[in-house]
């Protein structure tokens, strides 16, 4: 029994050490106006805001360093489409905030402060939502990172707060937490724009597939297939504490995947304005999403487990 007790103690201590080691292996490096995020000394993504109208994350690399998002317009890579230049890898924006269009880069989400905490594996961005110099709102985004041997993830935890005047997030499909996938994960080809062949498939938490997932309510959306010949998957998750969970999805066959709780008219055919949300002065809205990328195949059970682990987080 003493031998068993000693063995269990060693195992528990070893597991605790492994957890601590993993937390320490999420590191941040400031390079000019960018924050490079490394997982176990391997690049995962870079948080970029200087020179942009909104914060963007690029590149996003799955285990094996497989690129999961489109490079253009941030980087010119062969075989990529040049549509929708406002689709910049991974971002958070909305197309109608008091009439201002942050989705199409006509208004600016200006990052004013960046702080990193390696002990918590997180980076904090504080921003101003500006329209022609007028501040409509502010936000605090906490970006948390994690990984294991076959998957990596980012939690984008955003709290947006109205300023001196009410702020209305309008009913439009153009939003909100978004990813533009690698062209290989598109569902349909576009030979006229450099994409003659694609390999992507999609499914949501309700079992709907491919083009049928657009506009539907679901807890998560999953795009998968080979990228550069390597099997990978990309999963966006809506936290159960979010507004109008399960959210509606602006998920397109050309590789846009966006969780959008506001676009009820476009997505569900409800009367125009049904999806509007107004924050009174000083009121705030919190939205939390996870982007998970992984190498290899995944099963229905694994995807359920991944979502349940995220959903249990406060």
Image (cartoon, rainbow, N blue to C red):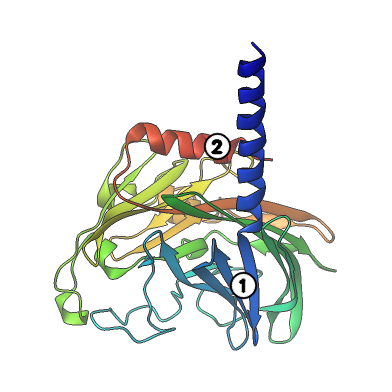
Label 1: how many residues lie within 10 Å, few (<14), some (14-19) or many (20+)?
Answer: few
Q: Residue at x 17, y 80 (%)?
A: 192
Front residue (pair 92, 301): 301
Residue 188 position in % (x across, y down):
20, 63
Q: Are marks 2 and 1 in contact (CB under 8 Å)?
A: no
Q: Position of residue 8 (x, y in %)?
A: 62, 23
Is there any visible trace of residue 233 in the rendered image?
A: yes
- Residue at image mark 2: 309
Toward the viewer: 44 or 23? 23
Q: Earlier in the sequence, mark 2 or mark 1?
A: 1
- At x 40%, y 85%, the residue is 75
Quadrant of the snapshot with the C terminus = top right
Percent of width and height locating residue 270: 47, 47
**Among the 4 quarters of the image, the one containing residue 60:** bottom left
> Splitting the image into 4 quarters, where does residue 182 fall?
bottom left
Q: Quadrant of the N terminus?
A: top right
3 vs 257, left or right, is: right
């Amino acid at each position: 029994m003493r031998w068993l007790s000693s063995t269990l103690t060693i195992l528990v201590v070893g597991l605790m050490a492994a957890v601590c080691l993993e937390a320490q292996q999420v590191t941040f490096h400031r390079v000019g106006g960018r924050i490079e995020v490394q997982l176990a000394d391997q690049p995962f993504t870079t948080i970029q805001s200087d020179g942009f109208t909104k914060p963007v994350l690029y590149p996003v690399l799955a285990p094996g360093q497989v690129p999961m998002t489109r490079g253009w317009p941030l980087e010119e890579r062969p075989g990529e489409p040049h549509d929708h230049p406002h689709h910049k890898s991974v971002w958070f924006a909305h197309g109608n905030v008091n009439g201002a269009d942050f989705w199409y880069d006509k208004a600016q989400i200006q990052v004013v402060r960046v702080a990193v905490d390696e002990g918590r594996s997180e980076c904090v961005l504080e921003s101003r939502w500006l329209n022609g110099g007028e501040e409509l709102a502010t936000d605090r985004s906490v970006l948390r990172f994690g990984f294991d041997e076959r998957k990596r993830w980012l939690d984008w935890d955003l709290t947006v707060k109205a300023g001196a005047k009410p702020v209305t997030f309008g009913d439009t499909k153009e939003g909100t937490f978004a990813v533009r996938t690698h062209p290989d994960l598109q569902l349909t080809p576009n030979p006229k724009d450099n994409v003659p062949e694609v390999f992507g498939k999609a499914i949501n938490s309700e079992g709907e597939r491919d083009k049928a997932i657009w506009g539907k309510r679901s807890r998560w959306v999953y795009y998968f297939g080979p990228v550069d010949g390597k099997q990978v998957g990309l999963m966006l998750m809506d936290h159960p504490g979010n507004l109008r969970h399960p959210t509606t999805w602006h998920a397109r066959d050309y590789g846009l995947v966006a969780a959008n709780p506001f676009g009820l008219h476009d997505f569900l055919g409800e009367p125009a304005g049904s999806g509007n949300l107004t924050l009174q002065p000083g009121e705030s809205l919190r939205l939390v999403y996870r982007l998970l990328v992984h190498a290899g195949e995944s099963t229905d059970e694994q995807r359920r487990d991944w979502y349940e682990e995220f959903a249990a987080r406060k």
